[in-house]
Image (cartoon, rainbow, N blue to C red):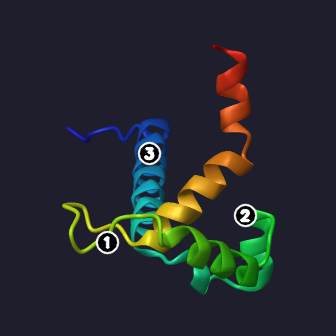
Amino acid sequence: MVDVINFPLLIAALQNENERLEYNRKKELRTTMDSLHLPENVFKQIYRFSKNTAVYLINQISQYLPDPARERLKIPKAKIILCALLFMLRGVIKNLQGKM
């Protein structure tokens, strides 16, 4: 007896696998990539200011943060600061304040 292949099911399974692989690839990039190595135009699209401004802000703010070598997670100061700036720039704080 010949098995019948369910093509719609096979296509859906392949699409799910592709989506999972793409998600994992993006997740790996987020955890390993240094934002300061992005091209200037991409950096400006994400953060809304230049890399020079980012470096200036990192230098100004980093003196107030603990040394990452002493912390358990060892997250670089630049990454912490850029994540915080991105959080604020995206208006998340505004949205949270409105719901409190």
Q: In this view, does 63 lie to the left or right of 66?
A: right
Q: Which residue is drawn at 72% across and 74% down?
A: 43
Determine whether 11 is above or below 27 in the image.
above
Amino acid carrying label 1: it is Asp
Q: Is residue 26 left or right of residue 28?
A: right
Q: Tell me the tag on residue 67.
A: 1
Spatial distance from mark 2 to mark 1, Cα to Cα?
26 Å
In the shown orientation, is residue 88 left or right of residue 81? right
User: Pointer 3: residues within 10 angstroms few (<14), some, or many (20+)?
Assistant: few
The disc, 2 or 3, on the residue closer to the chain's N-terminal end is 3
The percent position of residue 6, horizontal first and vertical second, equals 41, 37
Count up the numbered dots: 3
Crowd tier of the residue under label 2, counting other residues whose Cα lies within 10 Å: few below 14, some 14–19, many 20 or above: few
Q: What element carries label 2?
A: helix
Which label's residue is closer to the chain start, 2 or 1?
2
Q: According to the image, label 3 marks what residue? A: 16
Q: Classify mark 3: helix, strand or loop.
A: helix
Above or below, comparing residue 24 to residue 4 in the picture: below
Instruction: Please rate how many residues cluster around mark 1, counting C-alpha atoms within 10 Å: few if below 14, some from 14 to 19, many from 20.
Output: few
For disc 2, the marked residue is 46
Element at label 1:
loop
Mark 3 or 1: in front is 1
Question: Which of label 2 and label 1 is nearer to you?
Answer: 1
Q: Examine the image and state in which quarter residue 99 appears.
A: top right
Between residue 63 and residue 1, name the one nearer to us.
63
In three-dimensional space, the C-alpha distance between marks 2 and 3, rounded to whole angstroms, equals: 28 Å
The residue positioned 48% from the left and 51% from the top of the image is: 19
Residue 16, percent across and down?
44, 45
